[in-house]
Image (cartoon, rainbow, N blue to C red):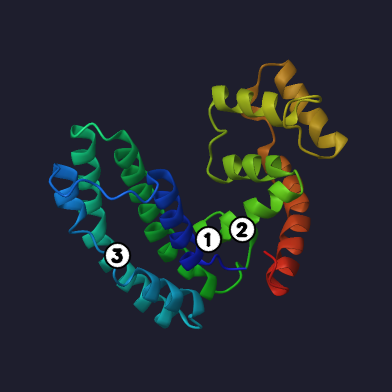
Amino acid sequence: MPKKYLESWKKAKAKFEADTGKKKPDPKSRFGKIFSKISSTGFEKSLKAYDAAKTVKEAEKYARAFQSAASDYIPTLDAAGKAARQDGDGVYADACAAMVASLNKITANVFMDLERFGSWPDKLDNFFKSPYWYKLLLKQAKKEYSTENLEIFGLILNKKVNSEANAQKAYELYIRVGSAKEVNMSSSTRKLCDKCAQDGKWKSIPWDKVEMEVAVNLADTVARLGAAVADGTA
C-alpha cells in the first residue's frame, strides 16, 4: 500500500507543535523575526493530490509542486532554527531541525515512490535496482525474519564478496553453521563452502551456487510480497 505523505506531513507538524508547546516566539528575537516569515502554503494541497494520483504524470506534477513549496520553506526554517540556537532557545532550534529533516525525507520519498506506478520487477535482480521495490521487499523480509537472504544476495549481486577479506566475512556471517545470520541452503553447497573456508581458499567459495539457492528462498518472499501488493497490504 503506497505511503500517505499528507499523513507524514501532518505528523511532522503535530510533533513540531508538541515539542514547542505551540508557544509563540518573541517577535523581537532573531528567531521570531525569521519565523514570522515562514509559510507552509501548498504542502497539504500538493500532498493530498499526490496521495490520490492515479498516474505517474499526475504524481510527478504534485511531487514537483510539493518540492517547490518545500524548497522555499526549508531554507527559511533552517535559518530560523539556527537563529533560535543563537538566541539560546534550544527547544525551537531542535524542533526546527527535526522539521527540516522530516521535510527532506518526505521530498526524497515522494520522488522515489513514483516507481509504484511502474511495472512489477520482471526478475529478482531488478528488485535491487529499484529503491521503491527494494524497500517493499525488505519490509516483507523483515516481517518474515529473513533479511539475511536479501543481504547476502545483494552482496553477491554487487560483487561485494570477490576479495578474500569480504568473502571470509560473508562466510562467517551468513554461511557457517551457527553463524549470526545463517542462510538456508543445501548441505552439498554448504559443504563446498566449508571446504574452501577450511583450506583458506576464500576466493574459491562457489558464490554462484549460493546465489541460486538464496534466490529460491527469496522467491517465496517475493511471492508473498506480490500477494500483499495485490490486496493492498504491502
Amino acid on which the number 3 mark rests in the picture: Ser
Circle on res. 184: none
**Label 3 to label 2, Cα distance in Å?**
30 Å
Q: Quadrant of residue 175?
A: top right
Q: Is residue 35 left or right of residue 21?
A: left
Would residue 130 be seen by someone viewing this image from the given angle?
A: no
Distance of label 1 from label 2 (alpha carbons): 7 Å
Residue at 52 percent of width and 75 percent of height: 117
Which is more foreground, mark 1 or mark 3? 3
Q: Residues within 10 Å of mark 3 (few under 14, many from 20)?
A: few
Picture quarter containing residue 31? top left
**Residue 214 locus on image (x, y percent):** 73, 46
- Which mark is on residue 136? 2
The residue that label 1 is drawn on is 132
Percent across and percent down for residue 93 are 29, 39
From the image, tell me which residue sits under label 3: 40
Give the residue type at disc 2: Leu
> As rendered, which of 51 and 189 lies closer to the eye?
51
Determine whether the residue tagged by mark 1 lies in a helix, strand or loop: helix
- Kindly tell me whether residue 96 is visible in this rendering: yes
Categorize mark 2 by other alpha carbons within 10 Å: few (<14), some (14-19), many (20+): many
Q: Quadrant of the N terminus?
A: bottom right
Relative vertical location of residue 42 with respect to residue 22 in this rendering, above or below: below
Which label's residue is closer to the chain start, 1 or 3?
Answer: 3
Which quarter shows the C terminus?
bottom right
Image point 39% across, 58% down: which residue? 108
Side of 2 where 28 appears, left or right: left
